[in-house]
Each structure stands twice: as C-alpha cells, then as structure tokens.
Amino acid sequence: MTDTAQARLIIDGVSKTFTGKDRQVTALAEASFTVKPSEFVTILGPSGCGKSTILKIVAGLESPTSGRVLLDGREITEPGRDRGMVFQTYTLFPWLSVRENIEFGLDVAGKTRQERQEVSEHYIDKIGLRGFENFFPRDLSGGMKQRVAIARALANDPEVLLMDEPFGALDAQTRTVMQELLLDVWDESHKTILFVTHDVDEAVFIGDTIYIMTARPGRIKARIEVDLPNQRTFDLKLSEQFTQIKRQVMRLIREEAWKAANTNT
C-alpha cells in the first residue's frame, strides 16, 4: 500500500467472495490502495477482476469479506451522502424532469426550494443542460442522460465521486466530449474521484493516477502516476508523452487480459 498519511480514501486489504448455488467466486483478494484528497484515480483491469466490486464496497452497497475501507479515517459500513455514484446504465427517475432529477437528493435531505434551485441552476449551466431542464429522460440522448446523472451526484456535494464506466455505452465522439466535460467539472469542484474503465486511452486522459488490477481474483498489480498537464484537451491524446504512458499501461495490462481470457474459474 502507498503512504496513508495524506489519504482521503484507504482500501486496506479488501477481499470479496461471492457464494452462489454451486460454487464460491473470489472477486477480490487483499486489494489495497489509497486516494488523496482531490485526486482523480482511474482503475483498469480485465473483465471480472473486481473493479466494480471495489466501487460498490466504497459506496457501502457491498460489504467486504475481509479488509476495510476508510474515508477520512472512518470505516465505511453503509451508504452515505459523503459518496456519490454514477453507473454505466442510465439510472435517472423517468417520471422526473432533468431539474427534478438533479434536485432529488437535495429534496430528500430537506433543502428548501430556493436552495435546491440554486444548486440545480449551477449544474444545469455547468454540465451544459440549459434549455433541457424541463425535459424527461425519455427525450434525452445517452450523453445527455449521463450529464444529468453526473449533475445529480455532484448536487449532493459528496466527498468522493464514484464512477463505474459511466461513458461505456456512448459513441466515441460523445465519449470524448464527456471526458473533457468531466475534467472541467473536476477542475472546478476539486472532488476526489474514483473512476472505473476498460478504456486505456480514457484512463490515461482523465486520471492523475492509474491503478492496474490483476485478473480475478483482483489485486493491485501496479500504480502509475500520469505526468500530463492539468489542462487536457483532445490534442493531448496525439502527443508522444501521452503515447508513452499508454504503452506502459498496455504492457502491464496485456498479461492480465490474457489470463482472464483463458481462465474458466
């Protein structure tokens, strides 16, 4: 594990075993890493290595079989408003408008109408939803739906934003736009972000730090610091500096991808 002195989030020896009707599957085996305040961490690994399981444990939606997760020194045992989560699938309430979806958590928390509106107005502008605030999810594209989901998560002002392949279902052009949009929001909010992805380019482009996981059972194979400018645009993906980091990541992850493709357990 890396130094925990300045860590906001500590994943400490976390293992997770799922028990089915016919067998047990160990998804994670003593995974350990840390996330600093305001750090943007991306997690890469082959399918089935436990990336999403880590997020669910941090969110308090799953309990570890062993090990623990600490947020600002407190052990996580259940969901809380200090963590927000954005999923790959669209999880908006279909009967609520864009504005009502963004304000939902604030309403549950007992915020006044004026307080809710001030927050939603900010994110409607920040996420590029102006003119769509009264639309319903059925009238939105996939990219627009994910903008609403991100705005809804940020509206609750969580300490940590958890993102489980939120752009995985989007086309390549929309995905690139969403990556730049997310970086812009992060630059303003300074949130601590834990972002799971299968896409190497995405992991390098948006992350401060990349954690690469082994094939199941998932462990942390490597930690890579992304030495790229803070202000990132599409052109950065064409640079030699970006390509060098991408090569390093690809070399590390290739072996694990082969292991995952050739295992039957």
Image (cartoon, rainbow, N blue to C red):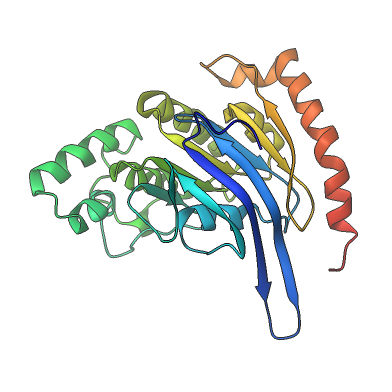
From this view, report whether residue 263 is shown above or below residue 115: below
- Does any portion of residue 187 appear in the rendered image? yes
Tell me the residue at 72%/55% (across/down).
49
- Does any portion of residue 88 appear in the rendered image? no
Tell me the residue at 20%/55% (across/down).
109
Percent of width and height locating residue 46:
76, 50
From this view, report whether residue 115 is shown above or below residue 181: below
Percent of width and height locating residue 179:
53, 33
Q: Does residue 45 appear left or right of residue 4 in this picture?
A: right
Q: Can you tell which quarter of the image residue 188 is in? A: top left
Q: Nearer the viewer, residue 159 or 116?
A: 159
Q: Does residue 126 appear left or right of residue 254 in this picture?
A: left
From this view, report whether residue 113 is shown above or below residue 123: below
Q: Can you tell which quarter of the image residue 240 is in? A: top right
Tell me the residue at 67%/68% (across/down).
17
Q: Can you tell which quarter of the image residue 159 is in? A: top left
